[in-house]
Image (cartoon, rainbow, N blue to C red):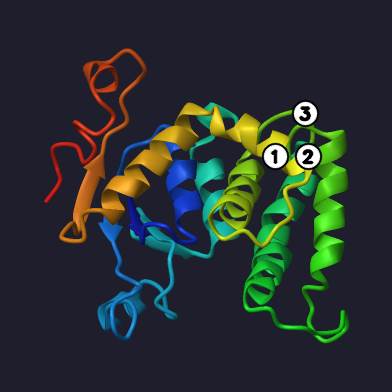
Amino acid sequence: MIKFYHSPHSRSTGTLWLLEELEIPYELELININAPGGAPEAYRTIQPNKKVPAIVHDGIIITERAAITTYLCDAFPDNDIAPQVGDLRRGPYLSMLVYCDAVLDPVIAVKTHQWTYKSNEFSFGLFDDMVEYLDQKLLHHPYATGSDFTAADVQLGIMLYWAIKIFPVMPEKESFMRYLDRLSERPAFIRALEKDQELAKNPRSTTAHFPYNKPGSRQNQDSPHDHMYGDGFS
């Protein structure tokens, strides 16, 4: 089983969404990154900078969102949300995964803090260039890498969601809003945000098991909060 280290309402929410898209069981361990001093010091053995997300699978530690996304989609390809090796679409897909971490994330962070800088001062470039690039991409394609939803949309979508709807630093361009409307209809997106909200309201929580239940099962017929943590919650 995947062990997933997560802090609600953080960069790891996208990984929570990805796990729901993949429909695989996982064990979730909450990491309080907002505690005095940040995450527990013991967590450094998993993530050296005490950041989330991180996962452990078959004893192997994987950190950084793009790496986690690539690893999980390669390890669990049944839901076909990532082009596999040999598929010509894999290049644009991997490019967008890394773009989100190498450009979009730091540019949004700098914009949030209202720092000013020249384009050649940092490797991630300018906010306006990023906005124009994504606007043109989403004007001409319904999803991040073309006509089909992929795990790159999880990465891009969750970041645009936070940067427009939660901490509004991105402009509400028509292309962005239509894109978010499409993503917000996905059952996995809905489940992930519901779980994240519940986890944020239960700071006592430390570990939870989330066995995936196919649509139509008893769990999915009940209230989405009735069995939020599964039988393994403690």
Which marked residue is nearer to the observer: mark 3 or mark 2?
2
- In this rendering, position of residue 98 left or right of residue 174: left
Give the quarter of the figure containing the N terminus. Answer: top left
Q: Label 3, label 2: how many angstroms apart (C-alpha)?
A: 18 Å
Q: Residue at x 66, y 32 (%)?
A: 149
Mark 1 vs 3, N-terminal side? 3
* Type of the residue with mark 2: Glu
Mark yes or no: residue 22 visible: no
Which image quarter: residue 142?
A: top right
Q: Which residue is mark 2?
A: 174
Residue neighbourhood size for the residue with mark 2, other residues' Cα within 10 Å, grouped as few (<14), some (14–19), many (≥20): few
* Type of the residue with mark 1: Met
Mark 3 vs 2, N-terminal side? 3
Q: Which residue is mark 1?
A: 177
Count up the numbered dots. 3
On screen, residue 58 above or below 104: above
Q: Residue at x 78, y 82 (%)?
A: 122
Give yes or no for contact between labels 2 and 1 (Cβ–Cβ under 8 Å).
Answer: yes
Q: Label 2, label 1: how many angstroms apart (C-alpha)?
A: 5 Å
Give whichever of 76, 4 is nearer the camera.
4
Q: Which mark is residue 147?
A: 3
Secondary-structure class at tag 3: loop
* Type of the residue with mark 3: Ser
Q: Label 1, label 3: how many angstroms apart (C-alpha)?
A: 17 Å
Mark yes or no: residue 71 visible: yes
Q: Residue at x 19, y 59 (%)?
A: 206
Instruction: Please state the horizontal and vertical placement of residue 231, each as a whole percent of the image.
Output: 13, 37
Instruction: Please state the horizontal and vertical placement of residue 12, each as a whole percent of the image.
Output: 45, 58
Residue neighbourhood size for the residue with mark 3, other residues' Cα within 10 Å, grouped as few (<14), some (14–19), many (≥20): few
